[in-house]
Amino acid sequence: MLKWAVELGQFDLEYVPRTAIKEQVLADYLLEFDSEVDDKALVTLYPPHVEESLEEFPHPWWILHVDGAVNNRGAGAGIVLVSPEGHHLMSIIHFKLYATNNDAEYEVLINGLKIALEMGVRNLIARSDSELVVNQVNGGFQARGPRIKLYFRYTQRLIGMFKEVRLECVPLEKNSNADALANMGSQQEAVLSGSITPEIQEIPSIPEIEIM
């Protein structure tokens, strides 16, 4: 250290600590939106990585990737919302409720649609690897059972709040980010690089069904 001090002493140098750039970028980004968002479990990932070009669409479109996971550790959901500029907003949900695989897929889609609405999104492309849920919502499959019908109707009501929504079924490999978050969400203590704290959901999005 003494040697470096002697060598550099002839120069007029001043040490300036590096400022926190990441936090300022996130603050500036959130200020662009009018609606307030509860970002308890919502995290922006930088730098952005754009999976597909949105230049073919004449209006700003957002992309929503959702996936639900039910395993022996529990149930969870992963949400990745991509802005037209390519910024990724990620969310993890841990379900403290009984949920089948189809329940988890509907729950994550409902939560993803709610987040998009809170962000002021008008045009949305929603992508899920659940063929059953996508086809039921799009009208290809019939929603059977009282519980699934409630999920179906609630999802349709949320979709009606957007200007336009396109729900697409994609292979798991094209939904890998949401899938990884969903698997982490199945563990309540899951943390992604110390930056995402899973949101805890204790009750279903739909009213409980009384069983006689």
Image (spheres, grey):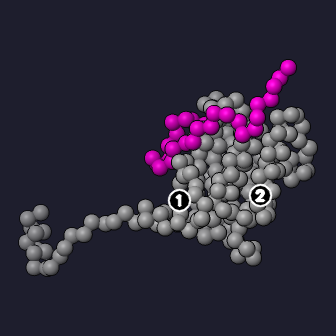
- Residue 115 shows up from this direction: yes
Label disc, if present, on residue 137 of the rendered structure? none
Q: CA distance from mark 2 to mark 1?
A: 27 Å
On whether residue 184 falls in the magenta region, the answer is no
x and y percent of residue 26 in the render? Answer: 48, 63
On whether residue 204 falls in the magenta region, the answer is yes
**Label 1 amino acid?**
Leu
Quadrant occupied by the C terminus = top right
**Bounds of the magenta segment:** 185-212
Who is closer to the viewer here, 116 or 4? 116
Q: Using the image, determine if residue 4 lies above or below residue 146.
A: below
Who is closer to the viewer here, 115 or 91? 115
Mark closer to the chain start, 2 or 1: 1
Residue 70 is left or right of residue 44, and the answer is: right
Dot 2 falls on a residue whose secondary structure is loop
| Residue at 64% from the left image edge and 50% from the top image edge | 79
Disc 1 target residue: 45
Disc 2 target residue: 161
x and y percent of residue 108 in the render? Answer: 69, 45
x and y percent of residue 25 in the render? Answer: 46, 66
**Label 2 amino acid?**
Met
Q: Using the image, determine if residue 63 lies above or below residue 133.
A: below
x and y percent of residue 89 in the render? Answer: 58, 57
Q: Main secondary structure of the magenta part?
A: loop
Foreground mark, 2 or 1, reads 2
Q: Residue extending furthest top?
A: 212
Residue 133 is left or right of residue 44, and the answer is: right
Quadrant occupied by the N terminus = bottom left
